Amino acid sequence: MPELLAYQLLFVTGKGGVGKTTVAAAIALLASEQGRRTLVCEAEPKGDLARAYECGPTPFSGRRISDDLVAMSMDTEASLREYLRVVAKVPKMGHIGPVARAFDFVATAAPGIREILTVGKLCFEIRAGRYDLVVVDASSTGNVVGQLAAPSGINELIRVGVVRSQTDWILEILGDPARTGAVLVTTPEEMPVTEAVDLAARLAAETPVHLACVVANRVLPELFGRSEELVFNELTRAATLDFVARNLQTSRELVEDVLAAARLAVTVRRDGVAHLERLRAGIASDVPLLYLPYLFARAHGLRAIRQVAHALSEELVT
Amino acid sequence: MSRSERDIGSDARSRPIPGRAGPSPELEQTRHLEQLLSAKEVVVVCGPGGVGKTTIAASLAATAAARLGGRVLVLTVDPARRLADALGVGGLGNVARRVPDDAFAAAGVRPRGELYAAMLDMSESWDALVRRHAPDAATAQEILANPLYRNITRRFAQGHDYIAMERLFELHEDGEYDLLVVDTPPSLNALDLLDAPGRMAEFFSSRLLRWLIVPYRSRLVNFASRPFYQVADRILGSQFLEDLAGFFILFQTMRDGFVARAEAVNRLIRDVRTTFVVVTTLEATPAVDAEQLIESLRERHLHLGLLVCNKVLPASFSDPPVGRTAELLGERAFELASVLVDRLPSDPETAGRPSGEMVGRVLAEVARSFANFRLVATREAELLHEFSASHEVTATVPYHPGHVTDLHGLLDVGAKVWGDEVAVASGGAASRAVSRSRSSHGSGRGSKSGTSMVRDTAASVEVGKTPLKEPGSDAGS
């Protein structure tokens, strides 16, 4: 299994709301800072990537973020046009307008067309050699399996034609564990971990893509050791509370409210540890599990992406 | 503590709230929610991913069944096994199962009505739809056996939205339930859900579909469609186009049924008996998504019944006097530790004495931890303030460490959405602290009244502990 940044194509996925875009943006930023020519693509464009980098819109044609970093949004119709022009070398481009509309229809109805236009474009960038690494802010749990399984599905359904001949090399890239990997993002909570474990199994069973690593995002640090926790518990006793309140010349209620935050941190951390153990047990032991800390500071925008990228680089060193 | 001691009371709504003369914001909220859920027949719970939609949907349904009565069904798309366990129905399937009275009794409640739960099984629902709309059993069988059909229904993400709305319509039409609460699938775009029936109708009415199913040969001579055909043939291969056409010829037989149905589903979504509940957390990204969702509900003239802000940190975390106390504690941690250390007992296991240094570290850590949460809580308070200012009915559900694992937990969350003051503490200082501070940021937060609200709530927790019923009598009825 290669180092995370040595991959050529990474699909970042996980349950909605766990921080996929943040992690994808951070991986791409880190790779580009290490001199790898990097493309990061938002597969389901909602503008999250543009928000993460605090830049303007990231169109299909790409927006340069820095010397080695380009961000783009997937657009299946644009992908189709590019495909027809570059790969299929279809003449009479004037007729492409209605064709694209027709395709929109067929893609709505026919299985896997939209998906293969997404995955195909990304694999094409790898094959064209314009980038060293393509990071995909992929769909969430439900849809990513369909997306990554589409090339094999199409292969079964379509027996001739250009699409058929294209799926072979796409499958070769997707299925190569030295080049392509999935990054599964989760948080140390009930449902995200359950879904991550399920998704790891489904990726293995239904898609050619290998699991590169699992990222546990928003992990709270351990607050107290055992003897420190004994002291902390002692603090919450009425007599101790009164003593502290008297010394700080404040009320016991206010001190209690302050302690509540630490109590919450301890509870959440303990709860999270149990879920992380379940996560570790639920994924193959050779798949690395990376931890990213909970960011209490303003957790969006470029500053947050830099913080996550920094935490990620420390995880990758150890 | 036995469960019966933690009653939230099926008749809590009729109980006077102690220490209150005028209607509190909570009481207003309670009234609103009772009116809303009594007047509406369909509640669509939607919102961005990961905010706890499923839990809120189940809580609303359980609380409505407990307090308002009638037959209430919660339809979930999330195969959350823990939720099925929580409801005491084991596994969930397409067929609704009644939540046993035992589960309510275990939560110390005798429900006025009945609660049912069902999961939306996409592939089963699609099959049922085909069987209903196909002209005869043989055609239905042929469609179901078509490999393209399997692929479409499994991978067609937008189809899930349609199916959710379809099932909702079917259940509503059957008229077996007084209230339907539906938890929506995580779509790419929450609005897909609203457009799904329209798109399905459009799909069948499309000229392209008609074109695709005209015989192969006449398509070749049709000049207008030649460029499309040439490209499509080149890309997909004529065999695939033929397969596709073959499938759509079959599918077309269901056209009238589908279109009529999709229109009816559309009418139900817009019906005065339907309301939308938007769930979000007060984190930046979900909040933006939720705001957009609300905006588009408004554009479509759809009814927004309630905005639920879930997993909200206690108001005390952003309360300035508490913040000042934390700062003071941080500044004087080691000084305080030196006088505090002698009052602390030895470690019962090692008999070791805590050092002043270590106690100082603990105090500093407590202060730092508060400062961390204060940052988050202050951001949340700001967002909540914006939400409350622009949306009439906003309910907050406090951050709940751990997970809702039983009906009691669902009813507890329901009580928060309901806005009543009878909070249920489930043991442990942390949850006590959370529920004690459960009065929302929106209700006089940061002011002196905000602090007194917290005390009031603490008092009413005691009231809530008074057992209202013996669990034994519930189980027998």
Image: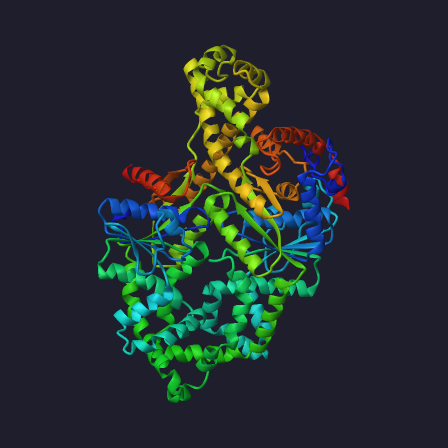
| Residue drawn 30% across the image and 68% down it | A82
Residue B96 makes an appearance in the image: yes
Most foreground residue, B363 or B396: B396
**Does B268 appear above or below A12?**
below
Most foreground residue, A170 or B456: B456
Residue B122 makes an appearance in the image: no
The quadrant the N terminus of chain B occupies is: top right
* Image quadrant where residue B426 sits: top right
Q: In the picture provided, is B124 more to the left or to the right than A6? A: right
Residue B267 picture location, percent across and down: 63, 66
Q: Residue lying farthest front?
A: B389
**Does B399 appear above or below A99?**
above
**Does A152 appear above or below A296?**
below
Residue B373 picture location, percent across and down: 48, 32
Most foreground residue, B445 or B114: B445
Residue A46 picture location, percent across and down: 42, 55
Residue A79 picture location, percent across and down: 33, 66
* Image quadrant where residue B405 sits: top right
